């Protein structure tokens, strides 16, 4: 399944916009968290979606 991870700065500029392929929501969340950490973006507003459904959101 395809998931989309996006992270934003406070001015709404996109810092991270990644496509994630994973077999489950749990796997996608783990991959997303790793990608956020790699980009040093875990403290930014971010979301993980799948077919319009919000899987993970933090601000």
Image (cartoon, rainbow, N blue to C red):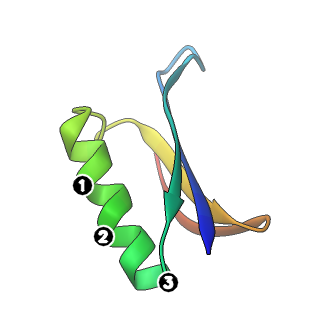
Which mark is in front, 3 or 2? 3
C-alpha distance separating marks 1 and 3 = 16 Å
Q: Name the one closer to the observer, 25 or 19.
A: 19
Per the image, label 1 sits on a secondary structure element best described as helix
C-alpha distance separating marks 3 and 2 = 12 Å
Coordinates of residue 17 in the picture (x, y in percent): 54, 35
Per the image, label 3 sits on a secondary structure element best described as loop
Residue drawn where x is 50% and y is 81% of the image: 25
Residue, disc 2: 30
Crowding at dot 1, Cα within 10 Å, few <14 / some 14-19 / many 20+, comes out as: few
Which residue is at the far right? 52
Which mark is in front, 1 or 3? 3
Which mark sits nearer the N-terminus, 3 or 2? 3
Which quadrant, please, contains the N terminus?
A: bottom right
Per the image, label 2 sits on a secondary structure element best described as helix
The label number, if any, that marks residue 34 in the structure image: 1
The label number, if any, that marks residue 7 in the structure image: none
The answer to whether residue 37 is above or below residue 28 is above
Residue, disc 3: 23
Q: Are marks 3 and 2 in contact (CB under 8 Å)?
A: no
Q: Are marks 1 and 3 in contact (CB under 8 Å)?
A: no
Is residue 53 rendered to the left or right of residue 57?
A: right
Which mark sits nearer the N-terminus, 1 or 3? 3
Coordinates of residue 37 in the picture (x, y in percent): 21, 44
Q: Are marks 2 and 1 in contact (CB under 8 Å)?
A: yes
């Amino acid at each position: 399944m395809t998931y989309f991870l996006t992270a934003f700065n406070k001015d709404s500029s996109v810092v991270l916009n990644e496509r994630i392929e994973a077999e489950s929501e749990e796997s996608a969340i783990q991959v997303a968290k790793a990608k956020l950490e790699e980009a040093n973006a875990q403290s930014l507003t971010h979301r993980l979606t799948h077919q319009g459904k919000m899987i993970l959101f933090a601000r």
